[in-house]
Image (cartoon, rainbow, N blue to C red):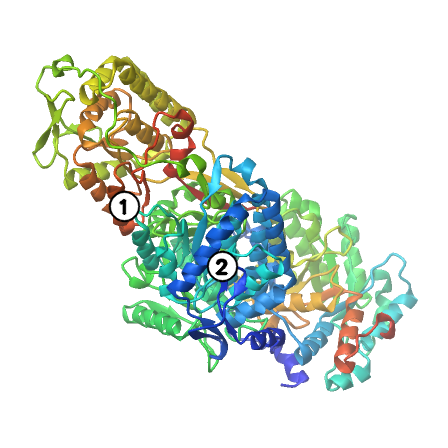
């Protein structure tokens, strides 16, 4: 574990992209995660930190900037994706921003996340907005199509204009302990991504143990992932706080050893403003405020935005708001 | 700060709990009297209850006098007949109603607790009050099932209960719930600093129509507590607080027959092995030492971390400390609230300053504390050793001391290097390692991969100077119940056995004999070089017996301590050796019967019966050695909580004049069956029997030091045993005034003392004396929490 090649204690200046590191089996062997202890910490974070009033509004606006606004349904169409992009360009009604005194803030989501088939549509719809398009890839959500196909899929999405590629790992490689296989596949994916950032979806709900989640996180980071992400949203268990704690602590450890900052993306099931605040508190406590920025943290969500809008409207009017008054995502 | 600034820095801002209703309640009350016989008395001789977060006066509280305590005790006595006569179901309904009623007013209780004590609202809301509620629910169940679960037991009567200020309502619940479930009535004194939730609890008792006098609450300072401890109308004292006051209570109650349970101080180790989930272990320390400002008796205040990960661990710990938020306890985003009062801030600050002066390395996070109120920063000391005051003494504040260890043995040695023995945490992902360490820790509660877990179903309480008695679970109920037959015992008449024709001395032995002491498996001459003659019933000198002195006791205790590994032997092996003792005694039955006749003038039939019963007794405890098991409790989380019966350690035993073979064999067999080495002092005139018996011991494969016998004056040697810090428990059967002396002399290390109190125990009664009665005294319960999950 003597990987310290980048001395980046100097601070925040420039985010350095993960160059990748050799697979370190000793490091991997030393990863242990105690589920019960993680659950205790995760279970109390929401009660330990609470933000109210203006602070809450500011946090929720920040949350919007951290959302990968997502539509990943088998019945998606170009029209549906264009509506999604329209929402991305106007995530909060201007009268609400005005009411909050936040008009000068340029609030936009971290990215719009779609299937490959809709990348071109989204790129076009978002043109000039500065919002990147992310494509789920590599046989999402199972990741079991032929490797060649998966590599081609990445390249096709990059070519279509995706700036971020959300790839999925083969869960079986984790369960069978084929860490080298996983590492090599991730390296290949990363290479295929080129300039596009690689977000690796671990499918944590299918990895059986928290220690497996920790180890898979490490292997992906060593292989060059820019982000590690919990879930596809299609597993039975998606993002939750204890798994987030496991992954965040692995990111922290990786940073301590290498000086490289890796992003974190919980996805699936985060649908309320309250949930979002709890996740943000967890990140702030465990990683520091620095990590609450779009290049280091994203929510993979679709209905979350509407709930946040409702809370913001309530903040402005003092009346509880309803979802049908918020422009549909 | 405007919204765009907050958008960048993501500060938490303020998140205050609304205390309006609590203040309105306090304003309406203004001042509080005592709660006696179901009614509030008029406030009198008041003193203020202060909010430590800002110094404001919250209410006026009455100083309880001896007269107030007396009234409360009388009310409790009066109520006891009716309350203990209710069916279990009836009592269960009341306890259930108390739980419900607290639950309905949970937030008022929580806010009052935080105002009065200074603890963060998150803790009073999420820990103190829910745990108190759970305690009443849990004990409603015990109330209903008391007859079947504790057959043959009765409540003590009136219990005097004195509780501390760190967990005001929770400690009240820990005291009142089991007492009431068992059928006792109580007189409780809350701490002078934190009486508010106790007074709201009194109102709760009124609201649910609890019969008058069942619960009485008298407020006041130490003198009020002393009046409770000294009151003749109280049958049992339960105290939670400092070891210093606990020792005073032990002395005060010596010889008066009151039941006693003490839950005292601690300096609990928090052991982290290199294979632990380190981040989780760091986080666990937040629960261990920065929960409730560190004002926790079981706080994990001594960090022991394996040397190989020490640097990394301390670095992570400091980073974690930087995230702790200290301040207004009513703020929902505060981790550490206010200390209880200015005196405590000063006391703890002085300890911190002393630590620095003596060369310890201090770490406190940067940043300012609030301008007013009683605050102390979370504090870490490194570069310390067991020689340092801050390592040895209980600090009772947010102060952690950190040391390293090289290997598991050293971890255990450092962990046990303390006068206290309340709790311990062990962090390792290796179950083999963790479960190897657990039984070796001298602590009443051990948390594996967690810290500071409590539940009503799981016993809590200490080893060594951390006190005795348990709170919670079946073992906690035990502390409020007494055997019915024991309550009926009469004082022992001294003119004992009916005499028959005495045996001539020559019948037993004609060769000149000096019985020695039996220490460390060898017959050794007494230190004094004096002997005393043993005279037969017919007046003849039979033999000379070594006249043991304090040095013989010292040597015997040393031998016994070396034999403490006896407790690690398998129960099967201990049983085998007890059986073998029985077998060999049976072989020499005639000889012992003759000796009994010679010494005590027993009839042939009685002498034979005494020997037969003694053999039967050895078999009885052999048979129980591998059957007196612990329990597995059910706390409301994914964890196993094992209540293990562990040996006390070295037990000193002084045996009575009567049943001169059966009584010592009973006590010795019970003690060693559970793994305790013993130092046995036979009654003076019967010491020859026991020196005969060591020949049986020597032929029965008893390991050296497990049984040690010193003859001499039982009252003098008993006192030496009681004062000896290396003796973990003392059983003394003898005259009432001697029993009182033994109890008073035990305060040095607060060993657990059982005395006969001068009462007439029927040693021949197998049902009473050949089972749990002594096994309970031979063991202490260790509760081990093992959460699990992958």
Q: Which mark is residue A32?
A: none
Instruction: Say which chain tag 1 marks.
Output: B
* Quadrant position of residue A71: bottom right
Residue B730 location, x and y as percent?
A: 29, 40
Can residue B790 be seen here? The reply is no
Considering only order in the chain, which callout, 2 or 1, is on the residue closer to the N terminus? 2
Residue A176 location, x and y as percent?
A: 65, 42
Please tell me whether residue B47 is drawn above or below residue A204 in the rendered image.
below
Q: Which mark is residue B216?
A: 2
B322 or B204, nearer to the observer: B204
**Residue picked out by circle 1:** B740
Instruction: Say which chain tag 2 marks.
Output: B
| Mark 2 burial class by Cα count in 10 Å: few <14, some 14-19, many 20+ | many
Residue B517 location, x and y as percent?
A: 17, 30
Q: Quadrant of the N terminus of chain B?
A: bottom right
| Mark 1 burial class by Cα count in 10 Å: few <14, some 14-19, many 20+ | some
Residue at image position (85%, 58%) is A73
Can residue B155 be seen here? The reply is yes
Q: How many marks?
A: 2
Residue A15 location, x and y as percent?
A: 61, 72
Question: Share a chain, discs 1 and 2?
Answer: yes
* Quadrant position of residue A284: bottom right
Label 1, secondary structure: give it: helix
Please tell me whether residue A284 is drawn above or below residue B248 in the rendered image.
below
Label 2, secondary structure: give it: strand
B377 or B146, nearer to the observer: B146
CB under 8 Å between discs 1 and 2: no
Q: CA distance from mark 1 to mark 2?
A: 29 Å
Please tell me whether residue A307 is drawn above or below residue B442 in the rendered image.
below
Q: Is residue A250 left or right of residue B34?
A: right
């Amino acid at each position: 574990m003597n990987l310290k090649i980048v001395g980046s204690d100097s601070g925040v200046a420039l985010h350095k992209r993960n160059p990748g590191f050799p697979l370190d089996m000793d490091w991997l062997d030393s990863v242990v995660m105690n589920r019960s202890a993680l659950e205790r910490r995760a279970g109390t974070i929401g009660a330990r930190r609470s933000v109210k009033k203006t602070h809450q509004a500011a946090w929720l606006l920040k949350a919007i900037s951290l959302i990968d606004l997502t539509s990943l349904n088998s019945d998606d169409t170009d029209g549906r994706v264009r509506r999604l992009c329209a929402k991305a360009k106007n995530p909060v009604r201007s009268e609400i921003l005005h009411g909050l005194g936040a008009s000068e803030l340029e609030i936009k989501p971290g990215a719009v996340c779609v299937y490959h088939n809709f990348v071109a549509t989204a790129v076009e719809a978002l043109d000039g907005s500065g919002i990147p398009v992310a494509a789920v890839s590599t046989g999402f959500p199972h990741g079991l199509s032929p490797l060649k196909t998966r590599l081609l899929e990445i390249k096709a999405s990059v070519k279509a204009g995706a700036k971020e590629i959300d790839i999925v790992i083969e869960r079986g490689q984790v369960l069978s302990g084929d860490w080298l296989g996983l590492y090599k596949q991730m390296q290949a994916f990363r290479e295929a991504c080129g300039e596009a950032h690689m977000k690796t979806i671990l499918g944590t709900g299918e990895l059986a143990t928290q220690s497996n989640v920790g180890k898979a996180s490490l292997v992906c980071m060593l292989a060059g992932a820019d982000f590690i992400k919990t879930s596809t949203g299609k597993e039975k268990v998606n993002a939750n706080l204890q798994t987030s704690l496991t992954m965040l602590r692995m990111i922290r450890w990786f940073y301590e050893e290498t000086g490289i900052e890796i992003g974190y993306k919980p996805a699936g099931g985060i649908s309320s403003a309250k949930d979002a605040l709890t996740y943000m508190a967890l990140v702030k406590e465990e990683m520091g405020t620095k990590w609450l920025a779009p290049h280091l943290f994203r929510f993979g969500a679709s209905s979350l935005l509407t709930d946040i809008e409702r809370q913001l409207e309530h903040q402005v009017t003092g009346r509880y708001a309803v979802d049908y008054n918020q422009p549909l995502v | 700060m405007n919204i765009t600034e907050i958008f960048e820095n993501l500060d938490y801002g303020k998140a205050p709990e609304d205390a309006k209703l609590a203040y309105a309640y306090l304003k309406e009350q203004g001042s509080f009297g005592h709660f006696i016989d179901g009614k509030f008395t008029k406030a009198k001789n008041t003193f203020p209850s202060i909010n430590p977060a800002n110094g404001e006066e919250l209410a006026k509280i009455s100083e309880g006098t001896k007269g107030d305590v007396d009234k409360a005790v009388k009310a409790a006595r009066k109520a006891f007949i009716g309350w203990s006569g209710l069916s279990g179901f009836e009592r269960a309904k009341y306890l259930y109603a108390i739980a419900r009623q607290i639950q309905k007013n949970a937030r008022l209780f929580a806010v009052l607790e935080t105002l009065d004590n200074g603890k963060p609202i998150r803790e009073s809301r999420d820990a103190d009050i829910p745990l108190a509620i759970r305690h009443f629910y849990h004990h409603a169940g015990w109330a209903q099932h008391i007859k079947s679960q504790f057959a043959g037991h009765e409540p003590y009567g009136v219990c005097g209960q004195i509780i501390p200020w760190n967990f005001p309502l929770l400690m009240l619940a820990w005291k009142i719930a089991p007492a009431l479930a068992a059928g006792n009535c109580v007189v409780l004194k809350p701490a002078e600093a934190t009486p508010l939730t106790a007074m709201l609890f009194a109102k709760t008792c009124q609201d649910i129509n609890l019969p008058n006098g069942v619960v009485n609450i008298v407020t006041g300072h130490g003198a009020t507590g002393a009046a409770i401890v000294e009151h003749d109308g109280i049958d049992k004292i339960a105290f939670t607080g400092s070891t210093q006051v606990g020792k005073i209570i032990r002395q005060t109650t010596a010889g008066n027959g009151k039941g006693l349970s003490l839950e005292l101080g601690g300096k609990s180790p928090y052991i982290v092995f290199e294979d632990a989930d380190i981040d989780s272990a760091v986080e666990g320390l937040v629960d261990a030492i920065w929960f409730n400002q560190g004002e926790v008796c079981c706080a994990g205040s001594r960090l022991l971390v394996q040397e190989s990960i020490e640097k990394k661990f301390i670095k992570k710990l400091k980073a974690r400390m930087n995230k702790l938020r200290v301040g207004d306890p009513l703020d929902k985003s505060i981790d550490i609230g206010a200390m209880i009062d200015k005196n405590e801030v000063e006391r703890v600050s002085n300890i911190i300053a002393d630590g620095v002066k003596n060369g310890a390395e201090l770490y406190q996070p940067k940043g300012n504390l609030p301008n007013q109120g009683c605050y102390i920063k979370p504090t870490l000391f490194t570069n310390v050793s067991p020689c340092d005051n801050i390592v040895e003494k209980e600090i009772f504040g947010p102060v952690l001391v950190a040391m390293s260890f090289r290997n598991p043995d050293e971890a255990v040695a450092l962990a046990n290097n303390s006068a206290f023995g309340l709790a311990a945490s062990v962090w390792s992902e290796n179950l083999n390692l963790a479960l190897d360490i657990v039984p070796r820790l001298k602590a009443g509660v051990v948390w594996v991969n967690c810290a500071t877990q409590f539940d009503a179903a799981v016993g809590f309480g200490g080893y060594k100077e951390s006190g005795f008695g348990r709170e919670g679970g079946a073992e906690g109920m035990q502390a409020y119940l007494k055997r019915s037959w024991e309550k009926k015992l009469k004082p022992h008449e001294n003119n004992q056995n009916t005499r028959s024709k005495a045996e001539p001395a020559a019948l037993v032995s004609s060769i000149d004999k000096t019985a020695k002491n039996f220490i460390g498996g060898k017959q050794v001459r007494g230190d004094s070089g004096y002997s005393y003659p043993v005279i037969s019933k017919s007046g003849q000198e039979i033999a000379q017996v070594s006249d043991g002195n304090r040095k013989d006791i010292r040597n015997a205790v040393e031998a016994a301590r070396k034999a403490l590994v006896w407790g690690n032997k398998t129960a099967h092996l201990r049983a085998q050796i007890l059986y073998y003792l029985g077998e060999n005694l049976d072989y020499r039955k005639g000889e012992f019967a003759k000796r009994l006749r010679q010494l005590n003038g027993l009839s042939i039939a009685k002498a034979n019966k005494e020997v037969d019963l003694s053999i039967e007794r050895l078999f009885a405890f052999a048979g129980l050695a591998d059957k007196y098991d612990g329990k597995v409790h059910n706390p409301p989380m994914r964890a196993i909580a094992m209540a293990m019966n562990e040996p006390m350690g070295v037990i000193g035993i002084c045996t009575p004049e009567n049943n001169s073979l059966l009584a010592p064999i009973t006590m010795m067999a019970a003690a060693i069956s559970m793994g305790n080495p013993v130092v046995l002092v036979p009654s003076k005139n019967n010491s020859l029997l026991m020196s005969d018996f060591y020949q049986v011991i020597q032929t029965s494969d008893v390991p050296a030091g497990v049984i040690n016998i010193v003859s001499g004056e039982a009252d003098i040697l008993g006192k030496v045993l009681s004062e000896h810090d290396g003796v973990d428990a003392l059983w003394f059967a003898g005259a009432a005034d001697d029993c009182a002396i033994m109890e008073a002399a035990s305060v040095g290390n607060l060993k657990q003392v059982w005395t006969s109190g001068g009462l007439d125990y029927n040693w021949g009664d197998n049902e009473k004396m050949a089972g749990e009665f002594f096994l309970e005294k031979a063991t202490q319960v260790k509760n081990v929490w093992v959460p699990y999950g992958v």
